[in-house]
Amino acid sequence: MAKPLFIFTITVCILFNVTVSPQSPTLTAAHTELIKYGFPVGLLPTNILSYNLNHTSGDFVVKLGDTCRITLPPDNYRATYSKTITGKIVENRIAEVDGIGVRAFFRWWGITGIRSNGQDLTFEVGYITKSFPSKNFDQSPECEGQRSSS
Ligand SMILES: *[C@@H]1O[C@H](CO)[C@@H](O)[C@H](O)[C@H]1NC(C)=O
């Protein structure tokens, strides 16, 4: 009697694994933490070495294996991540960000804050803000040039 259930369970496990495997090897505890605070995983690239979060103050430090360049769809904004990214995270808001830059209007700008309302992400550069649909950040981006250099 137990056998059909056993086979069913195995089948479900296999199906589940197949579904999640393209994304799961790259997701780290830091990505999981983003989700808990209301942010999509795509805010952080895949090459995370370590992260540290003070749950009381929200202060965090994310260390990457190397600096990272990515291109954000759909407008092809170029962004760079420093090896060390710091900030302060609370539900739906990341403040005092240091280590993430975006290229716009012919120069680089340091992102200072990021807000989430579930639908959209709003990036702040000082008092200037720009919003994008959160679904654009569903996948953790792979750093450009990383594959070919390793
Ligand atoms: C975490 O933050 C709180 C509040 O700022 C501070 O009192 C505490 O010392 C911090 N803990 C660590 C491990 O840094």
Image (cartoon, grey):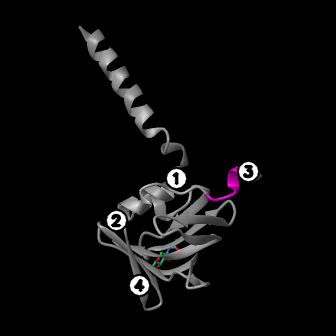
Residue 146 in magenta stretch? yes
Q: Disc 4 and disc 1: Cα gap in Å?
A: 28 Å
- Which of pointers 4 and 1 lies earlier in the amino acid sequence? 1
Q: Is residue 18 above or below residue 39?
A: above
- Residue name at image x 49 percent, y 54 percent: 29
**Circles 4, 3 touching at the beta carbon (< 8 Å):** no
- Residue name at image x 50 percent, y 56 percent: 140
For residue 148, the mark is: 3
Q: Is residue 126 above or below residue 73?
A: below
Q: How many marks?
A: 4
For residue 28, the mark is: 1
Q: Nearer the viewer, residue 86 or 11?
A: 11
User: What is the secondary structure assignment of the residue under circle 1?
Assistant: loop
Residue mark closest to the camera, 4 vs 1: 4
x%, y% of residue 36? 36, 60
The residue pinned by badge 2 equals: 38
For residue 88, the mark is: none
Q: Amino acid at mark 2?
A: Gly
Q: Is residue 115 left or right of residue 141?
A: left
Asked if the residue at label 2 sits under 8 Å from ligand 1, the reply is no
- Residue name at image x 46 percent, y 54 percent: 139
x%, y% of residue 106? 61, 84
- Which of pointers 1 and 2 lies earlier in the amino acid sequence? 1
